[in-house]
Image (cartoon, helix red, strand yellow):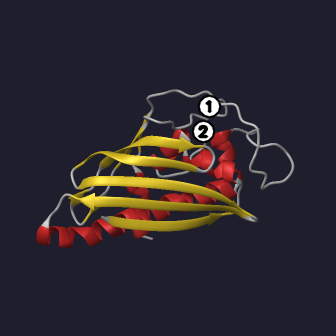
Amino acid sequence: MEIIRLTTWIAAPEERCFRLATCATFHEALARGAMRRVPKDLEETPLIGGDELIWPGHRAGMQLRYTTRIVAVRPTGYFREVLVTSRHFVHLEHDHHFTTLNDGTRVRDEVRYSLLSPGPAGLLVSPLVRRYLTSRIALRNQILKVTAESDVWRRYLGESAEPAGDPLDSNPGRSTSRNKGNKVSTERLQDWEMAQHHR
């Protein structure tokens, strides 16, 4: 089994980072390859247990598309995705951890996965998949960081998502409605990846 660990520091409150990372609307924005402006009356739709995320991907001609399901959510510090379907993975778990620091939030990702490809083929495929997963997670975290550290987060969480006062207060009040059965496709996250590689 392979393990990938990444840590990203964000100068924003823990709750803001967590709510963005588990916001269906924010995931749709990632899918379109930009932090697009969303309608002001659009309500925040949190991802919850049972929701599925579809991740595309290509590396060296391989189709790395896979689907994960949210199986655990512990606001505002943790959520987990596990593999549902894939052509190349036999196992995948992605743990997302959010921890308040004195000057912001530490976002820690840990991905554990195994590939279907055995023998020599697996030796060739493994480093390609590892680079793909590492770059995708790093890119998503960079977008999360830029969004959370600017006023762009208000497009997804609402103008009054946090009270006035300490900008690093991680306990703002919240009232949201949850709709079960969301299926969030990130089909165009690859556009972001391609844009980054060609800069």
**Pointer 1 local density, CA inside 10 Å: few below 14, some 14–19, many at least 20:** few
Q: Residue 86 in the image: x percent, y percent?
A: 25, 49
Are the two marked residues, 1 and 2, in contact with CB atoms closer than 8 angstroms? yes
Q: Tell me where residue 44 appears, x and y as whole percent.
A: 61, 35
Viewer-nearest residue: 189 or 199: 189
Residue 36 shown left or right of residue 113 in the figure: right
Kindly give the residue lying farthest to the right in the view shown. 165
* Mark 1 residue type: Leu
Q: Could you tell whether 20 is left or right of 72 in the image?
A: right
Residue 27, x across and y down, in percent: 50, 45
Q: Residue at x 44, y 29 (%)?
A: 181
The residue located at (18%, 68%) in the rendering is 122
Q: Is residue 80 above or below residue 3?
A: above
What residue is drawn where x is 84% and y is 53%? 166
Q: Which numbered disc covers residue 38?
A: 2
State whether residue 113 appears in this view.
yes
Helix, strand or loop at mark 1 = loop
Q: Quadrant of residue 196?
A: bottom left
* Left or right: 168 in relation to 85: right
Circle number at residue 42 = 1
Q: Quadrant of the N terminus?
A: bottom left
At 79% across and 51% down in the image, what residue appears? 169
Secondary structure under tag 2 reads loop
Instruction: Please indicate, yes or no, whether residue 187 appears anywhere in the rendered image.
Output: no
Q: Pick the quarter of the image with the C terminus.
A: bottom left
Q: Amino acid at mark 2?
A: Val
Q: Residue 139 location in percent, x, y?
A: 48, 62
Up/down of 4 relative to 27, above or below: below
